[in-house]
Amino acid sequence: MTATAEPEVGKSRRRKEDARLITGRTRWTDNITLPGLLHMAILRSPVAHARITSIDVEAARSMPGVLAVVTGADLADEQGSLPCAWAITPDMKNPPHPSIAVDTVNYAGEAVAIVVARSSAEAHDALEAIDVDYDELPVVLDMEAAVADGAVLVHESLGTNKSALWVFDSAEAGTGGNVDEAIAAGEIVLERKFRQQRLIPAFMEPRSVLCDPTGEQVTLWSATQVPHILRLMLALTLGVPEHKVRVIAPDVGGGFGGKLQVTPEEILVFLLARRLGKPVKYTETRSEAMATAHHGRDQIQRLTLSATRDGTITGLKVDLLADMGAYLSLVTPGIPILGAFMFNAIYKIPAYRFSCTNVFTNKVMTDAYRGAGRPEATFAIERMMDELAAELGVDPLAIREKNWITHEEFPFTTVCGLTYDSGNYEAATEKAKQLFDYDGLRREQAERRERGDVVQLGIGISTFTEMCGLAPSRVLGSLSYGAGGWEHAAIRMLPSGKVEVVTGSSPHGQGHETAWSQIVADQLGVPFEDVEVLHGDTQSSHKGMDTYGSRSLTVGAIAVVKAGDKVIAKARKIAAHMLECSEDDLDFAQGRFSVRGTDKGTGITDIALAVFAAHDLPDGVEPSLDSEATFDPENFSFPHGTHLCAAEVDTETGRVTIRKYVCVDDVGKVVNPLIVEGQVHGGLAQGIAQALFEEAVHDENGTLTTGTFADYLLPSAADLPSFVTDRTETPSTTNPLGVKGVGEAGTIASTPAVVNAVVDSVRHMGIDDIEMPCTPFRVWGAIHGRDVDTGGSQAGGGLGSIEGGLQ
Amino acid sequence: MRVTMVVDGVSYTDEVEPRTLLVQHLRETLGKVGTVVGCDTSNCGSCTVHVDGHSVKSCSMLAVQADGCEITTIEGLARDGQLHPVQQAFHDNHALQCGFCTPGMIMQAIDLLADDPDPDERTVRHGLEGNLCRCTGYQNIVRAVQDAAHRLKPAAQADREHEAVGGGE
Amino acid sequence: MIPSAFDYARPSTVEEAVRTLAEAGEDAKVLAGGQSLLPVLRMRLAAPTMIVDLGRVPELRGVREDGDNLVIGAMTTHYDVARDHLVQDHASLIARATETVADPQVRHRGTFGGSLAHADPAGDLPAVALALGAVMVVEGPSGRREIPAADFFVDYFTTSLAPDELLVAVVIPKHTGWLSHYEKFNRVAQAWSIVAVGVSLQVSGGTIAGARVGLTNMASVPVRAVAVEQALIGQSAGADVLRAAAEHAAEGTSPGTDGNGDAEYRSQLARVLTGRALAIAVGG
């Protein structure tokens, strides 16, 4: 056999996944067709809050090609309630969450009727023949209004718009001091309010789901991040036996948390396929995705930070309002709570209190979006660090250095009770400063200020950390999450020497097939090309917790390694038998067992063939090397990094241009540097987009006015700079690969770096905050001391320009 | 209405409803599912194909408008099992992650290289402004396009001419 | 999503197109490049019963000279207009603005006439056509007539074209050798203009002999910045003159308000962008 002399791990392998993706041989869910396939279309509420007084479907029923027209009343008894897996408090209010509205709609876009027809076109034609009467109710959209006395209620029966209040207090937990005392004694006390605007994950592949009820198992293909969770939730929600359901996530075109969901459409397609006995497919339009796929962020953050006059932080108090939207989806209530442990970030903060009020409004649900709780926390604390530096008149890097955990202090237990295993903030920061020319840009900034240039320069800093590798099951248990955080893997040694790796992780762009192959190639000493990674099908990959929270490498790949260890252990017994030696005399390296001190040996693939034949195995040894493992991490991992952004602000127009962006990330050991760099690039783009471009805006009636890509502005290649990325490498000590996770790092770190740069550019004009996204209009308004109203739609452009074609 | 078009070198004649979008015709009638739909406002560019040698968004064109045209999709680029140099460059430079935008991105990259065989970074970025990617931050895509430019400098113009042969107008 | 069903006609002459449109009545819609119409149809924001596709009418395509004028066929694509040597030589402002329309794919399909007939105040071409004194040649059942750009744009997405008339060509007086720039301000590259300014200057011996300035998205119709032009003509093309002239840019405009800017901000942008456009035109 061919041994791999040079280690695969650490190599910039080109991805296995690419071959099908660059040639169009991809299996997106919407590409799949089956004999007799029917198509579903959904009529959605145009109003955000109303009682449905009547639905007339008769005309639609007789339209050409229509097989079924169904309303919520028709499905009320079988649709169950969409799952929420995270009851953050025992008294959390969680209203029933129907897949299709029965008598009330609570957000614009909620399903009210569905048509199944021979073609998608005919289904959409029939939707237009359905007549729904709404008795409109007042809406509540603003979180502060929603928690005020006498507020309009989203769910009248709950008596409140508050879903839950979740509190962490370091004094009560015994992990730190009393924050109120710290603030009372603070020489410096800063209070700030930040707004995390609502974002739309905007994965490029619209969601699609196809259900085939004709087999013994009902098979559901879905563009999901979570096929395993989906299968269980279908069983629990609909009462169907779990073993009668197979879920397949074929090629999935991005997720970013947006496909970490059990969707109404998945339930409805399942129910209609079952009812009609025929395969049914639903693929959303982009407009439907914008309006109804869950959104992200949407918090109002109030922070109080106390410090001594020399800049040492003494306490931090955080009060959040978090917008749930109209219902609680899969992990909606837990998203802000994931941030609770990150506000202290890399700093030694002795006293800390976090409280979060989860609030219902008449908008689509929020849920996981890249970073999920941690970008919000990182933004707030990194903005506060800049504010503290400005208050004290010192360099914002110096104030960070004064408060961060030094590399000698690891492992370090934080004020939240988390133990950071490793890190080196000094090293990453020093490297970033050099790459950035920090001192040179500070000089230029001073010169521009001196000259009163039209274009001012700002420097933004973000020294972030995050918790990755969700998650130790005991921690999830302590947070009342409805499941564990383990991951499963299996390795099958095929008789011809090839290897199948089964993973419970469910990639949708990350490159697991390549990275897992590299890991297994090294571990078992087989060629990279001889490893096939199977995933995303509950029939082949029968057990898993799927992909989100930068967990795949730190949890999923570790399960693969554990399964590999078992394969080697099984093979060792057989090798000893074949080589007529003791197991203790065997060394295993590069795929070969060799008898120490001799030239005798055998390859692991030879053993696989011998096991297949099974003619001569030691007594009591089963004829298989195949092994599986389920890994539950003992701790999170804590990637960190230093991001530096230089932004130019045109003071006449308010336009922000990123002049230079440098980041040095420490994600521990790296399996594939090329993939890691790509993850950082993409993360940066999304974080920068939050800072500058993206915002889900609703009008006063609750209609999403940024409901297409013409209005919800994703940056194109022409709108982003090239980034300078580099790494330091401090291995994680919590897993055998020393890896930390990289999927969310760029997104988490970049948003505050950019906003800090924008604020820094105009701080000498007396400005200490600009709301996100920092649009030209907002920045110009700040410079000219004007409150800007970013609502309204009287001018040309965006969807208005498209609708103009009506005339 | 009866339409005939040559798609990836094969001539097809079909009866289509006038309202059928070109991309639907490609996907649903001809099975060319390599070309995908990512939005409904012609912003994302995922559906980009070449019609008579020029990139277009096949979601913003009716199948009947393509009657008599020669169309190239992502599925028609590789010749004799050899990837097109732009495909190869996307692979080599890790210019894709989830890959959903990739067919459109590659088709547009080929178009921009036909117009400018040696584009600077700014030209590449602006040449791709009609194609959205949510995964890569574009950096490796830009890198791939410039890499491809070096690989196929003399070939780019020939490609366009090849595609335009037998074009409708 | 797929559009609602419609009938489809593909005339091969202007005469046939006009007849087809007249016969189809008011629920018919003309399909030029389709880059604005197709998204509308797909989202079912409109459901015309008949689509008249001008894509196979050869006489509607191309750019030609006609004495002191250029004649741009209505169905000439943005791609072809921007690269056309006649346009570059004699109406460079049209070329500069056309290069910024949407994105390359849209420019391959979208047409000059389609953009003007669409009359989107945020569109890039109406303002520059207005600035250069374009005249629309339209044809209906009762024959041809000419409409000056100033009379063509009536309101948001509304022109003085009758429902049974087609825009067949656009006549643009030659501005040979004029210095032009189109300064577009939008939030991301493929977005519509928040405000944009097109300027074309005839500079002779350091003196500005002619000036044309058009504003995009500063009213419900494109606006010609007459006060700016007057402040320039006869003056030396120096920085102070350009800057002072630009201060007049918002005069006579009535910009709208949306999330990207209110009237005051748009007025500020008009002044700033006009100043920059003038400086770039003269300098470059």
Image (cartoon, rainbow, N blue to C red):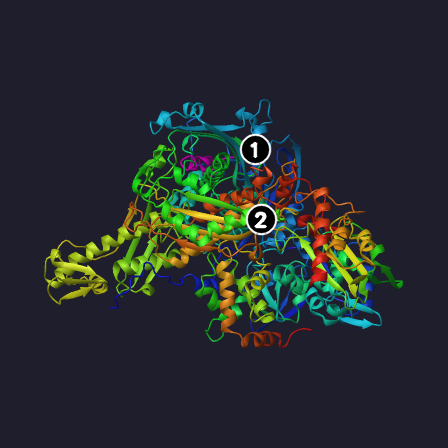
Amino acid type, residue under disc 1 in the picture: Thr
Mark nearer the viewer, 1 or 2: 2
In this picture, is C171 found above or below A433? below
Q: Is residue A661 above or below residue A139?
A: below
Which is nearer the N-term, disc 1 or disc 2?
Answer: 1
Task: Give x and y (percent) for residue A545.
Answer: 37, 45
Q: Position of residue A72 (x, y in %)?
A: 57, 38
Q: Quadrant of residue C198?
A: bottom right
Residue A765 visible here: yes
Q: Is residue A202 visible?
A: no
Mark 1 sits on what residue? A361
Left/right placement of residue A607 relative to residue B52 reads left
Q: How many marks?
A: 2
Considering the numbered disc 2 on the image, is that residue within a helix, a strand or a loop? helix
Residue A221, given in percent of the width and then of the height, sits at: 46, 52
| Picture residue at 49% right of the left edge, 74% below the top | B79
Q: Residues within 10 Å of mark 1 (few under 14, many from 20)?
A: many
Tag 2: amino acid: Arg
| Mark 2 neighbour class, 10 Å CA radius: few under 14, some 14 to 19, many 20 or more | some
Q: Chain of mark 1?
A: A
**In this rendering, position of residue B164 left or right of residue A528:** right
Callout 2: residue from which chain?
A
Bounds of the magenta segment = A327-342
Q: Could you confirm whether marks 1 and 2 are on the same chain?
A: yes
Horizontal and vertical percent position of residue A402: 39, 38
Check residue A88 for magenta coloring. no
A335 inside magenta stretch: yes
Q: Which residue is mark 2?
A: A448
> Are discs 1 and 2 less than 8 Å apart at CB?
no
Dividing the picture into quarters, in which one does residue A361 lie?
top right
Q: Residue furthest right?
A: C142
Closer to the camera, B74 or A655? Answer: A655
